[in-house]
Amino acid sequence: MKFVLAPDSFKESMTSKEACEAMERGIKKIYKDAECIKVPMADGGEGTVCALVQATKGKMYKATVKNPLGEEIEANFGMLGDSETAVIEMAEASGIELIGKELRNPMITTTYGTGEIIKKALDLGAKKIVIGIGGSATNDGGVGMVQALGGSFKDKDGNEIGFGGGELSKIQTIDVSNLDKRLKGIDIEVACDVSNTLCGELGASYIFGPQKGATPEMVKELDFNLNHYADKVYQTLGKDIKNIKGSGAAGGLGAALVGFLDGKLKRGIELVIKHTGLKEKLKGADYLFTGEGSIDSQTIFGKTPMGVSKEAKDLGVKSIAFGGRVLEGSENLYEVGVTAIFGITPGVITLKEALEDGAKNLERTVENVVRLL
């Protein structure tokens, strides 16, 4: 029997690697000689770097970078097993979890640190970059990232503008002549699962600004500033970053990655499937086992169980999903190839108990399912 194990992490309970190991233990209790191909997964958000590095036998690195408030911190990133593809999560340098609620202010937070990680990846010889852009604390249109890579944004007096979305209205000139030359010809894939544009009522400031600490007054100012910035980019580079779907992701970082670095916006799960070689590993498999902490009505919109089950269905492989909890709306997954869905909690228990015993519960549930198979 050949099983491909491709779960996401079970948040606060198991990493995707630990979930793979629990699944394998459950299977081997019944089929001692089963072939278990472990492919830890993620959907472009938290855990993507670890999942891709582990799946490709790559290597983790650290970089000293600026956090959203400009303070020095250590951020993790990885190089895949091919030694030429860097994988980065912008949240490692510019994420909302890095600063306390009372300090969150998109008028002053910057993506500079994300640019510093990209620079470090180039120092290591990266020829390709995969970057996940979820979970940002910023609304600076990616200007900080571009500054870290050698771009310049000057005000009417010829001075470089400061950090944060509050500074963008000061931009008078944009100069990319000193942008890091190593970026030329680098293939940049951006894991982006939102379709919001840069500006307007469905743009970065209005939709995501409030959760980053923006007041209603700030939201209006930030949106005005992003409009001004986009106009200046169009005048200088001839690129319309204002109306690209996904350009509003991560406070406009999506716009900068496309406009300044020629990045390509793609669904996170598609990138992870591609770089882990999941499709090849599924060939000849009897079953795919997948899962994540919560399987619900949102799972069908690009989450790991949806993405991997779709691949399995295309190859005629049955797919079984396991969830820490299984909620209404999860049945939508049957349409995309999931054969069955199982919750792993054994009864009425506290959330604390569920998180602590996640691996044990997953192992037991997988064992029972394999007995049935």
Image (tube, rainbow, N blue to C red):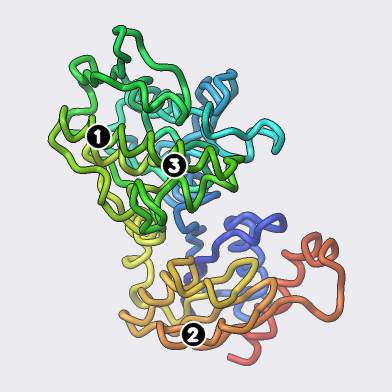
Place of residue 134 in the rendered image (x, y in percent of width and height, measured from the top left): 48, 48
- Residue, x 67% and y 74% (percent of image)? 26
Q: Earlier in the sequence, mark 3 or mark 2?
A: 3
Q: Which residue is mark 2?
A: 332
SS for callout 1: loop
Say if residue 115 shows up in the picture.
yes
SS for callout 3: helix
| Disc 2 from disc 1: Cα separation | 37 Å
In this image, 220 relative to 352: left or right? left
In the rendered image, the vertical position of residue 350 relative to residue 216, given as above or below: below
- Residue, x 53% and y 72% (percent of image)? 298
What amino acid type should be assigned to the residue bearing mark 1? Leu
The image's mark for residue 251 is 3
SS for callout 2: helix
| Disc 3 from disc 2: Cα separation | 31 Å
Q: Which quarter of the figure is the C terminus placed in?
A: bottom right
User: Would you call the spot at circle 1 few (<14 residues within 10 Å), some (14-19), or many (20 or more)?
Assistant: some
User: Would you call the spot at circle 3 few (<14 residues within 10 Å), some (14-19), or many (20 or more)?
Assistant: many
Residue nearest the observer in this picture, 254 or 76? 254
In this image, 11 relative to 47: left or right? right
Residue nearest the observer in this picture, 203 or 16? 203
Place of residue 190 in the rendered image (x, y in percent of width and height, measured from the top left): 34, 47
Counting every numbered tag in the picture gives 3
Q: Which residue is mark 1?
A: 261
What amino acid type should be assigned to the residue bearing mark 2? Asn
